[in-house]
């Protein structure tokens, strides 16, 4: 720890946190909704590797016959309060290399409130299908769902004469993927480190926001441009130990580690 502390470390971390995920190998708690009621609905299959899915189970909805309106609903999961930059990603594809124009709709709903298809967050029609066509889609989830028990629905609604819409590998995350190499940070530094009383910030551009986190991820101090007086942070009241300083400049963020002695 002391060796780490003697370095002014400008490392980056993937600040994304996994909130919920499913690779569809265990489907306990999923709900299947054959909205059009014709008996054709989502089901789990294996053998999607040629389309670009991982070995194992994926979910698929057929649309060879009849105009389909089929939905799958994830189990209920909690998005912890205070989380932001929420995102859903999953893998999607179509089985046919000619009849691939599958249309799907993604919804989010607070558990126990309203209907499953009240809040549409994404809608798209596939533009490719068949061998190697599976792709990852990433969808923003509004921050208002932080602190709530929610579930997601994927609805497949289609004209006749398509084939299968296929999905797998669901992942809900919070937080931004932080990046290196932003020029606003090239001349950025903090000193002294370790520090006993004051952490000085040197930056050639104004700092918009500075937040101090402990290693449990709890925010313990926060400053904006006007409250960051003289680019100094008084850390004398912090307990001794390791901390992370998240600095935001022009919407880009970097994380710096420092030690309070
Ligand atoms: Ca159906
Ligand atoms: Ca799978």
Image (cartoon, rainbow, N blue to C red):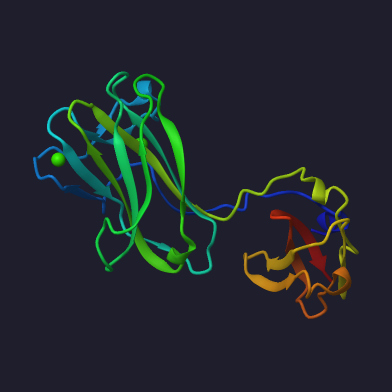
Q: Residue at x 74, y 44 (%)?
A: 180
Ligand 1 sits in quadrant: top left
Q: In the image, is residue 84 above or below residue 28?
A: below
Q: Position of residue 249 (x, y in %)?
A: 75, 57
The answer to whether residue 196 shows anywhere in this view is no
Q: Residue at x 17, y 30 (%)?
A: 160
Q: Residue at x 23, y 46 (%)?
A: 71
Viewed as shown, does residue 187 lie left or right of 119?
A: right
Q: Quadrant of the N terminus?
A: bottom right
Question: Along the line of sight, which residue is nearer the eye, 258 or 180?
Answer: 180
Quadrant for residue 226, please give it. bottom right
Q: Position of residue 23 (x, y in %)?
A: 38, 41
**Mark count:** 0
Q: Position of residue 100 (x, y in %)?
A: 30, 26
Viewed as shown, does residue 235 lie left or right of 46?
A: right
Viewed as shown, does residue 168 lie left or right of 62?
A: right
Q: In the image, is residue 222 above or below residue 78?
A: below
Question: Along the line of sight, which residue is nearer the eye, 24 or 117?
Answer: 117
Q: Residue at x 83, y 78 (%)?
A: 236
Question: Along the line of sight, which residue is nearer the eye, 68 or 27?
Answer: 68
Q: Position of residue 239 (x, y in %)?
A: 75, 76
Q: Quadrant of the C terminus?
A: bottom right
């Amino acid at each position: 720890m002391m060796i780490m502390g003697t370095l002014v470390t400008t490392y980056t971390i993937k600040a994304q946190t996994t909130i919920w995920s499913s690779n569809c190998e265990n489907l306990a708690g999923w709900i299947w909704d054959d909205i059009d009621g014709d008996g054709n609905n989502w089901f789990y299959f294996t053998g999607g590797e040629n389309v670009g899915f991982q070995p194992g189970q994926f979910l698929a909805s057929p649309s060879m016959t009849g105009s389909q309106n089929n939905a799958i609903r994830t189990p209920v999961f909690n998005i912890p309060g205070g989380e932001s930059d929420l995102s859903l990603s999953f893998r999607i594809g179509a089985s046919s290399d000619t009849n691939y124009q599958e249309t799907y709709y993604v919804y989010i709903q607070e558990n126990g409130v309203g209907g499953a298809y009240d809040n549409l967050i994404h809608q798209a029609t596939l533009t490719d299908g068949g061998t190697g066509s599976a792709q990852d889609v990433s969808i923003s989830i509004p921050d208002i769902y932080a602190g709530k028990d929610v579930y997601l629905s994927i609805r497949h609604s289609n004209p006749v004469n398509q084939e299968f819409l296929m999905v797998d590998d669901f992942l809900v995350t919070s937080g931004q993927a932080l990046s290196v190499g932003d020029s606003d940070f090239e001349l950025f530094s903090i000193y002294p480190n370790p520090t006993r009383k004051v952490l000085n910030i040197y930056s050639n551009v104004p700092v918009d926001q500075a937040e101090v986190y402990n290693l449990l991820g709890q925010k313990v101090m926060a400053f904006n441009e006007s409250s960051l007086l003289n680019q100094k942070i008084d850390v004398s009241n912090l307990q001794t130990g390791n901390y992370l300083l998240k600095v935001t400049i022009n919407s880009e963020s970097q994380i710096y580690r420092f030690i309070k002695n």
